[in-house]
Image (tube, rainbow, N blue to C red):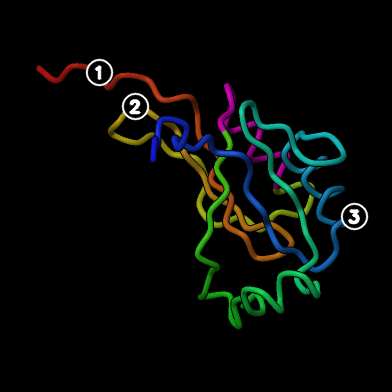
Amino acid sequence: MATTNLCPAFAYTVVYVKDVAKSLDFYEKAFGYHMGKLDSGQTTIAFTPIHQRETDKRSGAVQTPQTDGERPPLEVCFAYADVDAAYKRAVENGAVALSQPEDKEWGQRVGYVRDIDGIVVRMGSYVTKPAKQD
């Protein structure tokens, strides 16, 4: 049997949320995306209700963090030309500040927030080559 057509293409990420409309509105305001599935270049972020008959019966119920010290096994990452401005907008629109943007040794500026459903959102600059060390 030939397997030449079995190389997958990443299609989209599903984020299970309490209120789809509220999450879409939040992502629009906090991160600058537009309504509907969030177009993120080659992939899509699809917001889906936390409980739905189709997925709960087939793959089990979605588990959510029980405390602020826990987080789901998913992190959404967005790249911005101006991370500081994007971080400020996110917090002003309801994201919970976790870690203010800071420069990383690999040449990226990165900050973290938590969305209204507890998902950690990493906000980073486009990766650049680190400066040469003398």
Query: Image quarter for residue 104?
Result: top left
Determine the image quadrant of residue 106.
Answer: top left
- Left or right, residue 51 beside residue 12: right
User: From which residue to which does the magenta span run?
Assistant: 79-90
C-alpha gap between disc 1 and disc 2: 7 Å
Question: For the residue carrying disc 1, how many other residues have a C-alpha within 10 Å: few (<14), some (14-19), or many (20+)?
Answer: few
- Which of the 4 image quadrants contains residue 128? top left
Q: Is residue 50 magenta?
A: no
Per the rendering, the mark at residue 107 is 2
**95 w.r.t. 102: above or below:** below
Task: Kindly identify the residue that appears in the image at 55 percent across and 42 percent down.
Answer: 77
- The label on residue 50 is none
In the rendered image, residue 48, in percent from the top left (x then y), is placed at: 78, 59
The residue beneath circle 1 is 131
Give the left or right position of residue 83, taking residue 96 as reference. Answer: left
1 and 2 marks in contact (CB < 8 Å): yes
Q: Nearer the viewer, mark 2 or mark 3?
A: 3
| Residue under label 3 | 21
